[in-house]
């Protein structure tokens, strides 16, 4: 593992301790901060909570422009986890009055749209089909179990950004990638050994 | 009955009192069952799908669970953690989440102030709000008990579960006080009634004593099985339990 500094963005939402613990496990320099001037090699946007609240909190802390600048202009590797991924899109059915970061075009939709007979939120370990052997999924099987806890899912306009799909009972996108931007709906910091492997792969980018 | 997207979850539960894991029978006669931090770490490594940590004396003593304990467990255990005990306000929940809980369970606090469920769900999202319901048979009905089973309420467990869902809870942790610690099997009647009444996931709790008991609960559609005694005292190993369930055509997570 090469020496690097990871910025875990603290915007008042999300399981920061767990995300911190999983990255610190690999011995890299991890800073958990809400300071928009934070300098790091890679950025992680965690998040558990509602879309509208997420955007409002980012705004209040003046984090939106610095994040977009780091991601789009400086091409820093970025990982959005759960809500942290959903915020990358244009909008969400969860909070129609709010606009997302629009780093990836598309919408966030409610799981109930896909199938009325499923229990929502989807809480638990879901079979996940990894499309191709992409970098954050390197050295993994075609199907792996990851931990999910969510009611909404992402639907990017450009389907070629989808790098993994949920694959038990129903199918929908759960991981996306566009250039230096990665997003996962599941929680790698909570997905046991496979989740740690994904984090290690991200650190190896 | 609605279906879960994920596989059946196996959840060891650590009931914590004075910094130690304890376990009793029917919520009384508590005995020491180990160190919470070590237990959580070992269960995580052994294949637990989630770990539940309940500070069982917090509400009775009118305080929060230990935030340092939550932090230490969260930083070293890489499966989800549900923390409960003493949650009275959204601020309490915020602290538990901040210190590393993935989900927070409310019990007494929700019964005494149902609005708390709604406030927490709006602020943190339904997915991390678990309502723990402790139910006991009284005159042929399932009644809700609070303060770790010490106080009876007028609430019917099934009606209360429905109300919790309406208020926005994301999951029900359903414990049978009658079966707790007895190892004679989950209360399948109670479980079926609640599974049929709500569309959020339901965790069966109280009474697991053998692998067959987990299979019974899985077959009637439970989202997760929680257990304490059988894991603490080494009667069942999580890996063996999952192999058994898999052999019986229940989907579980294996590495």
Image (cartoon, rainbow, N blue to C red):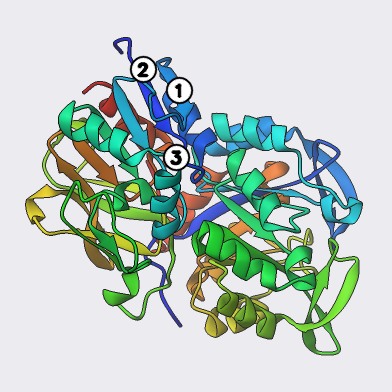
Q: Which comes before the other along the chain, label 3 or label 1?
A: 1
Residue B66 lies left or right of residue B90; in this view the side is right
Identify the residue position indicated by label 2 in the image. Answer: A5
Which residue is at the far top?
A3
Q: Is residue B117 left or right of residue B199?
A: right
**Label 2 neighbour load within 10 Å: few <14, some 14-19, many 20+:** some
Asked which quadrant contains residue B119, the reply is bottom right
Q: Which mark identifies residue A61?
A: 3
Q: Which residue is mark 1?
A: A31
Q: In the picture, residue A95 is in which quadrant?
A: bottom left
Q: Quadrant of the C terminus of chain A?
A: top left
Question: Where's residue A94, x and y in %?
Answer: 37, 67
Q: Chain of mark 3?
A: A
Is the residue marked by circle 1 packed among few (<14), some (14-19), or many (20+) residues within 10 Å? some
- Helix, strand or loop for disc 3: loop
On the same chain, marks 1 and 2? The answer is yes
Specify which label sits upstream in the sequence, 2 or 3. 2
Q: CA gap, disc 1 to disc 2?
A: 7 Å
Q: Which mark is residue B69?
A: none
Q: Residue at x 79, y 65 (%)?
A: B108
Question: How far apart, in angstroms, are the residues tagged by discs 2 and 3?
Answer: 21 Å
């Amino acid at each position: 593992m090469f020496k690097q500094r990871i910025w875990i963005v603290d915007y008042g939402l999300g399981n920061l301790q767990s995300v911190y613990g999983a990255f610190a496990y690999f011995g890299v320099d991890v800073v958990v901060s809400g300071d928009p001037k934070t300098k790091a090699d890679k950025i992680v946007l965690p998040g558990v909570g509602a879309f509208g609240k997420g955007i409002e909190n980012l705004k209040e802390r003046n984090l939106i422009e610095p994040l977009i600048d780091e991601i789009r202009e400086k091409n820093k590797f970025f990982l959005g986890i759960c809500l942290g991924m959903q915020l990358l899109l244009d909008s969400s059915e969860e909070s129609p009055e709010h606009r997302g970061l629009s780093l990836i075009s598309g919408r966030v939709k409610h799981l109930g749209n896909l199938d009325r007979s499923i229990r929502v939120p989807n809480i638990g370990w879901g079979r996940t089909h990894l499309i191709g052997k992409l970098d954050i999924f390197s050295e993994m099987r075609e199907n792996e179990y990851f931990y999910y806890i969510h009611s909404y899912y992402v639907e990017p306009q450009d389907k070629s950004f989808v790098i993994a799909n949920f694959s038990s009972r129903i199918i929908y996108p759960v991981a996306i990638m566009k250039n230096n931007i990665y997003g996962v709906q599941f929680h790698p910091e909570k997905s046991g050994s496979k989740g740690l492997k994904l984090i290690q792969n991200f650190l190896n980018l | 009955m609605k279906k879960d997207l994920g596989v059946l979850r196996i959840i060891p539960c650590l009931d914590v009192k004075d910094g130690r894991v304890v376990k009793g029978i029917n919520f009384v006669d508590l005995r020491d069952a180990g160190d919470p931090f070590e237990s959580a770490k070992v269960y995580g490594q052994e294949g637990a799908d989630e770990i539940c940590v309940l500070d069982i004396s917090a509400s009775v003593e009118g305080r929060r669970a230990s935030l340092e304990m939550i932090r230490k467990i969260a930083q070293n255990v890489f499966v989800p953690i549900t923390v409960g005990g003493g949650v009275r306000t959204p601020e309490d929940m915020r602290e538990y989440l901040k210190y590393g809980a993935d989900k927070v369970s409310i019990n007494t606090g929700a019964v005494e102030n149902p609005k708390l469920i709604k406030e927490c769900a709006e602020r943190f999202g339904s997915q991390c709000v678990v309502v723990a319901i402790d139910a006991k048979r009284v005159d042929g009905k399932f009644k809700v008990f609070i303060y770790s089973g010490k106080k009876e309420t007028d609430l019917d467990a099934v009606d209360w579960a429905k109300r919790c869902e309406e208020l926005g809870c994301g999951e029900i942790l359903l414990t049978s006080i009658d079966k707790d610690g007895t190892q004679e099997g989950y209360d399948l009647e109670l479980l079926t009634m609640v599974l049929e009444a709500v569309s959020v996931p339901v965790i069966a709790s109280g009474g697991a004593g053998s692998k067959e008991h987990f299979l019974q609960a899985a077959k009637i559609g439970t989202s997760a099985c929680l257990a304490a005694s059988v894991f603490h005292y080494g009667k069942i190993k999580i890996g063996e339990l999952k192999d058994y369930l898999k052999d019986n055509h229940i989907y579980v997570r294996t590495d």
